[in-house]
Amino acid sequence: RKEVEQDPGPFNVPEGATVAFNCTYSNSASQSFFWYRQDCRKEPKLLMSVYSSGNEDGRFTAQLNRASQYISLLIRDSKLSDSATYLCVVNGEGNEKLTFGTGTRLTIIP
Amino acid sequence: GAVVSQHPSRVICKSGTSVKIECRSLDFQATTMFWYRQFPKQSLMLMATSNEGSKATYEQGVEKDKFLINHASLTLSTLTVTSAHPEDSSFYICSAEQGRQEKLFFGSGTQLSVL
């Protein structure tokens, strides 16, 4: 089983729609969780950290379910500029290494 | 925000040559830097963790003699791909850690094409 698994997509979503991604992780001792955004052949950029209580940043909402070991990202009122690959990132207890999921490709359609 | 500069952005070289990639933290000191590789349509894969003043820690399956990492100062880490072959063609990205793990800044990446 991969350490971090994501649905690779692609997700083709009309502008203005709501889209949700899920990510599962295998290491139950993982402590930190993040969503990164990566545009084609560019470096990943931190979108948001994911906290146990869930957190929201504008149109983006991230949630963590430790019992089921999954993380979600919800994008509301999607914009054309949201088109990118979204990477789920996890690191383990006492481990500085970040493990990246394969990413979910999102394309917003006008 | 913090800036990490990675150079060069693109390299095209012949098989058998060595290629050096530089990663610099421009406005902060980075005791730890990370090197990743990304093949098309695949995720970033950590190659090694570079610690200033000490030997790099390589991930399983990464040849340390082929991918030489030097982290001689708090602002510079280099990755040298020695005797590059076409299978080494990939997108290489560095990142530098500022303070806590959450403060991780990425370079802009280097696209290496080995002919």
Image: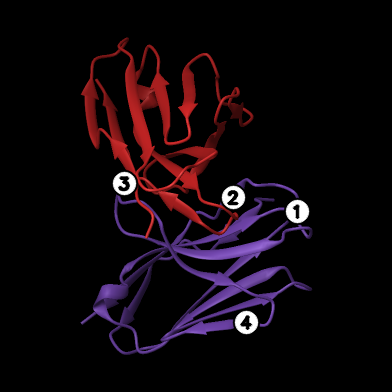
Chain colours: A purple, B red
Tag shown at residue A54: 4
Q: How far apart are marks 1 and 4 (CA)?
A: 20 Å
Look at 29% across and 55% down and name the residue there. Answer: A40
**What is the crowding at mark 1: few (fewer than 14 residues within 10 Å), some, or many (at least 20)?**
few
Tag shown at residue A93: 1
Q: Position of residue A60 (x, y in %)?
A: 45, 82
Look at 43% across and 65% down and name the residue there. Answer: A9
Q: Which circle's residue, 4 or 2, is located before the other in the chain?
A: 4
Tag shown at residue B108: 3
Look at 42% across and 40% down and name the residue there. Answer: B94
Locate residue B49: give its quadrant: top right
Look at 31% across and 90% down and name the residue there. Answer: A16
Residue type indicated by callout 2 = Leu
Q: Which residue is at the front of the view, B62 or B35?
A: B35
Q: Which circle's residue, 1 or 4, is located before the other in the chain?
A: 4
Q: Name the residue under label 2.
A: A98
